[in-house]
Structure formats: C-alpha cells, structure tokens
Amino acid sequence: MIAEAGLAALWLAAALSLLQLFLGIAALRPGGEGLLRAVRPVAVAQGVLAALAFLILIWLFLRTDLSVELVAANSHSAKPWLYKFAGSWGNHEGSMLLWVTVLAVAGGAVALFERKLRQDTLIATLAAQALIGLGFYAFLLFASNPFTRLFPVPVEGNGLNPLLQDPGLAFHPPTLYFGYVGISIAFSFAVGALVTRDVGPAFARAMRPWILAAWIFLTLGIVAGSYWAYYELGWGGWWFWDPVENASLMPWLAATALLHSVTVLATRDGLRAWTVMLAVVAFSMSMIGTFLVRSGILTSVHAFAVDPQRGAFILALLILYIGGAMALFGLRVGTVKEGSRFDLVSREGSLVANNLLLSVILGIVFVGTLYPLGVEAVTGEKLSVGPPYFNTAAGPVALILVALMGAGPLLRWRSDRPSALVTRMSVPVLLSAASLLALIVLAPGIGIFPLLGLSLAPGVAAASVAPLWKRNLRRTPLFTWGMVVAHLGIAVSMAGMASESAFTKETLVAASPGQTMHVGPFNVRFDSVEPVAGPNWTAIEARLTARRGEGTPFELRPQARMFSSPSTPTSEAAISTVFDGQLYVAIGEEDQQGRWQIRLWWKPAVTLIWFGGILVALGGFLSLIGRVFRERRSAAAKEVAAGADMPAKEVLV
Amino acid sequence: MKRKNQRLILLVMAVVAILGAVLLAMSAMRDQAAFFYAPGDVARKGLPLDRAVRIGGMVKQGSIQRHPDGVTINFVVFDETDATIPVQFRGITPDLFQENSGVVAEGRFQPNGSFVASEILAKHDENYMPPRLGPQGQHRTDTLE
C-alpha cells in the first residue's frame, strides 16, 4: 500500500499545482481579489505532498520493497543502508521525483516566507512555478512513474551501479538539484514581475535571497561533483569539460551573472530588462541541463534513461517553457522602464563587464556542449569537442573576468575617477607583477594559462580583501564580508587549478612488493598486496608507505574492487592530503611476473581548488544572512524613523 | 555613459559580446571539428599529425599485447569498415577496457598511421557501443563520466 500512497500523494500534488495555477490566474483578474489569500496555502500543501511522495520512495528503497519495479531494478538487499537511501535518487525516476520535489518545495517556501514582494507579483510568481511543476508532474506520472508495481515479485534486486556507491551520492545530487531547480524561483519571479509589470528595485531585493540560496547549493553541488569525479574515477583529473559537467556549469554561470546584475537593480535601479532576461536564461540552462543529462542522448553515469520518448517529453517541456518565457519577455520588455544611468568607470560599469564576460563564457560552453549534439542529430556525423576547445576559448575570457573581479569592488557606485582606481589597485598589481617575475625565474617552462593564473591569484586575492581596508571590521555588513570571502575563494580556487596543472608530478611503473618509487618529494615503498572484502565487494588492496624526506611515514591503500551486484570492477584511489597538496595513488593490473601497475601523482596545492569553491559558497551564505537581517532591521528601523544614512553606507557595499 | 541612449549602448555591447563569444567558439570549434576519428575516417580525412585527437572504435579480439615494462600496451581498434588503427598506450587502462568492447582514446597519430594514446577514456557502462555499432542506431554520444 505504501507505493500506492506515494503515487496518490504525487497525483494530489499535481492536482494542487493545477489548482494553484488557476487560482493564481483568477486572483489576478479584476474582481478576483478574494482569491488572493487562497494561493499561498495551496502552494505550501503542494510542496508538502511532493515531499511526502519523495519520502515514501526513500522508505521503499530503505526497505528494499522489491514489488516496486524501480526498487527491483536499482537496488539490492545486500547494499549498505546509505546506498539504499541515496540510491533512491540514483536512477531516472527517483532523480526526476527529487527534481519535482525541489521545485514544489521551493515554491512552497516562497509562499511561506516571501513577505517583501508585492502581493500580485507573488501570486503571479506562484502561478508560474505551478505551471512549471505541472509539466514535470505530467512527465513523472505518464512517462516516469517511480511507484510502478512489479509482478511477479523478484527474489532479489539488480543492484546499483557501483560507481554510484559512494558517500558522494548522498550529497552531490541533492545539493546540485537544490541549486539547479532552485533557480526556477528566479525564473518564476521574472515571469511574475513581467506579468504584473513590477520590475524594479523592490522586486530585485525580494528576488535576491532566493537566487543566493539556489546559487550556494549549485556552487556546493559542482564542487562536490568535481571532487567526487577526482577521487572516484582514479585519473586524477578534477574537471573534464564533459557535457554533464557543462550542464551544471552553464546554470552556474548564468546564476552568477544574475546575482551580480540583480545587485545593480536592487541598489541602483539599473539593468532592469537584462536582469529579467538573465533570470529566464538561468533556469533555461537548468532545463537544458536536465534534458542533456536525463534524456539519454548522452551515455553517462548520470544518464539512466535511454527511452527516446522521455527525451522528447523533456524537450517539449523545455521548448514550451523557454519559448513561453521568451515570448512574454518580448511582449513586455517595452513596458520595462529604463533604469537609472551610470558612468562606464563605476561599480555598475564593472558589474556590466562581469555580466558580459560571464555571458561570453556561457556562450562558449553552450556552443561547445550543444553544437556537436546538434550536428550529430542532423547529419549523424560524430563531432567530439574536448578540453582543448574549452580551454583555449574560455580560458582567456575567464582570466580577464577574474582580473576585473579584483578591481570591480574597489569602484564607487555611479561614477568614479580612473586615477582613483589605479591608486587602489597599486598593491594588487605590484603583487601580481612580482609573482609573474618570480615564476618566470623560478619555474621556467610552465604553460601560459598556469603562469597567468598563478600570477593573477595573489593580486586578485589582495584586491578581494581590499574593500575591508581601513574599515571597522565589526561594523562591516555581513554581505560585504560575503562578497570578500566569495571573491577570495575564486582567487584561491584559481591558484589551485593553476598549481595543479603546472606542478603535478606523475610516476607510472609496474612494481613488485618491496620496491620503492619516487614522485615529487616523496619516496613510496610498495609493501604488499592483500585481498580485502566489503559488504558487497571484494578487492585487491595494495599497501604502500610514503615518506617525505625524513618526515613521518604514512600508509596508502589503493584498491581494485570487484562489486558483486551488478558485477563490475572499479578502482578506488588512495589519496593522502598534506598541508601543501595531495599524494594520489591508483593501482592497475598484475602482470605475469607478479608486478602491479602503480600510478602515483603528487599534486601540489590541488586541495585549494575545492577549498576555494567552498569559500565561494560560504561567501554566498554570509551574504544571504546579511541580506535577510538587513531587510529585517531596515524594516524595523523604518517604523522608528526614516533611515538617513542608508545611501552613504550603500556607496561602498 | 551619460548620453541619453545608455540602454542602446548596453544592448549593443551585449550583442557584440555574445557575437564575439559565438565567433570565438566557432573559430575554436573549426580547429576541433576533426577531433574525433573512427578507423574508417582516417582514409577519408587524412592523418592529423599536427594536433591531439580522439579515436574510437572496438578493441580487436586477441590484439592486446603487453610490453615488458608492465605499463605499456599495444592493441588494435577497428570499426564497421575494414580499417584498423594500431594503438600504443602507456598507463593504467580503465576498468572497463577489454577486447571486443568499445574504446575511446585521446592522443596523437604517428606518420606511419599508428596512434599513441595519452589517455584511454573509460566507458562507465559495460554495454557501451560506439554509435555506429550500436544496436538500435540511436544518437548516443560518449562521455567521460
């Protein structure tokens, strides 16, 4: 009965989203004011029901209820409970249910917590969110029902792809989805504001925390996915420009641009139409990503479905929603008034540059990801676009963007003197120039991108913290701290990427136990090979002892695993993190002479890549808290007296 | 930007930036257009000796040979045409690399027509078939993850 309850909850939620849409439309028509108060509770109930359906699916997986087709096809009673739990979204139907649940819960959260937005805009926003939801409920119920029963009930399930049997599965997909699908809120806000002609600073201030929240999750999800690929795949790479990676990067680029343009709109009432456009684009990228990953046109660990009908369904939804939003934008953009003006050299000017460069990178990634698919679909010719394309096309733009990121926060709003900027940037520029010279002298022969990245990083880091210079740190608003931390995170992450690509040392040998190898500053002794067993796998485990100079030795245990259900080999790398980098070891096969293939990497400062990413997310989090509290306090202050010092404070924010 | 038509200027800048991106993308793409080679493509497109490319096809039964150093292997890739590419690779092969199954490798062609792979891309799907050998002839693209 439990599966039927889940299906019923899903149907009810779908019905409520239909009700939410019609109530919203009716409430916005003349004479419909009486219905305004009904929309919020419906949105909340819809969110609760979708969450309930999802919890029921998790429950079915935890119990390994094999009478449910999805559980039988993707789970196994011998799996550790964590993977039973996380495995509920490690398949097509379950992941789409998670998608819809996040959509509905996000809508419910807006209904519950959003108090700043004009009421008619809020209702229009919720109606838009319901409209998106309807399409995806239909997709679930008609093409991807997770609760289908199976008869006769099998004795055992098929198990989960071993590559997914990793703690990362519990964290990466939900985080990414919260960001990915959470961006739908920005889309619905934009649609709502276009419908009610409410595009302005108040709207931007209301929308900003929601964008920030989704963006934080998206950032964390990408960082987690990158680290997961790094340690699970065993090739030591952290980003492959793979279409599924690009599918998560594109919404992030758009959301990052949106985050910055919405600040211009909220603070200076500029970039009105552009901000609305970006909100539409950001969620469009999420939907395109969903299409790429879920339709089965890519063969990947992420693609569970190879049913062309499902792909067509998502494609139809995508065209409908993006097309509809673009049409609405085209119709209403004329009614969006032009915002206030500003100088080229100003905070606004730098944010415009940020937006343009992010859009350029987005365009490059978009073309590189979709063009080959388009060509293959039309002509059948296979075009493979790889890292060389993305690195040469997007790399220079990204470097310019990062350099500008250092300068932007040091500019004043509206208008500033170029000479003042030169003064403020003198220390960062000197730092970067010094690093560049030092690198050329001390590390000749490193590639141009790592060289520029490593020289830019210290300067940009210094420029990022410069907004705190000579300020009372206690009175500095949290959202300023947020910006500083996030920008610093980008510099840190870039230093890590550049260092990884410039200084990685690799050793590849076939070694017998007892032999000693060298990689970078480490001596690594190959001690022995032991068989080991886990709950649903057996493995050959190599024991190695690594030592740096005269330091304390430490052990590394890479494994070659064989999972039992389904029977699949995987390689588990051993990674040892020290303060200045990581030692990474993977083992391969044994040959006739009893030698084992061993691959060792010494990757200096590689951890900075993800540490920087976490800083970026932390910065977003500080901003979010700062914004929410500032709004609360300023709302309270307004009741006491009209705040007089607001504009002065905003100047350097 | 104090002129009256700031909006127009911003719009033009945006259009120029996006166009620039597409042009940049297209020109980079042209260099990459012939990035993927199936064995049958080599005769048709010529040997690309000046850059790194990807090849893909099936590993021929019985063609994997191991070198005495323990980390270098040779194998032969074929496709539905009769063409083959001899490949040399130094490294640890992915878990799913085996004879008679699909493979995608990145590296450089040598003047004699052989291919030195710097990387063998894993197919994390034991049922992977290169598109032209796929059972249903669906549009599927290989990806790394």
Image (tube, helix red, strand yellow):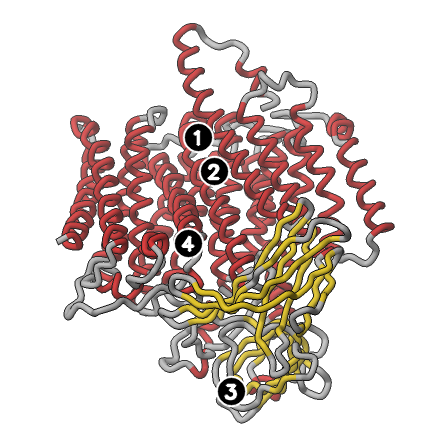
SS at mark 2 in the image:
helix
The image's mark for residue A169 is 4
Neighbour tally class for label 2: few under 14, some 14-19, many 20 plus, Cα within 10 Å: many
Q: Which residue is mark 3?
A: B79
Residue that lies at the very extreme toward the left in this rendered image: A1
- Specify whether disc 2 shares its chain with disc 1: yes
Q: CA distance from mark 1 to mark 4?
A: 35 Å
Front: mark 2 or 3: 3
Q: CA distance from mark 2 to mark 1?
A: 9 Å
Residue that lies at the very extreme toward the bottom in this rendered image: B82
Neighbour tally class for label 4: few under 14, some 14-19, many 20 plus, Cα within 10 Å: many
Q: Residue at x 41, y 81 (%)?
A: B134
User: Would you say the residues marked 2 and 1 are in contact, meaning their CB atoms lie under 8 Å apart?
Assistant: yes
Nearest the camera: A615 or B142? A615
The image's mark for residue A275 is 2
Nearest the camera: B123 or A170? A170
Q: CA distance from mark 4 to mark 2?
A: 34 Å
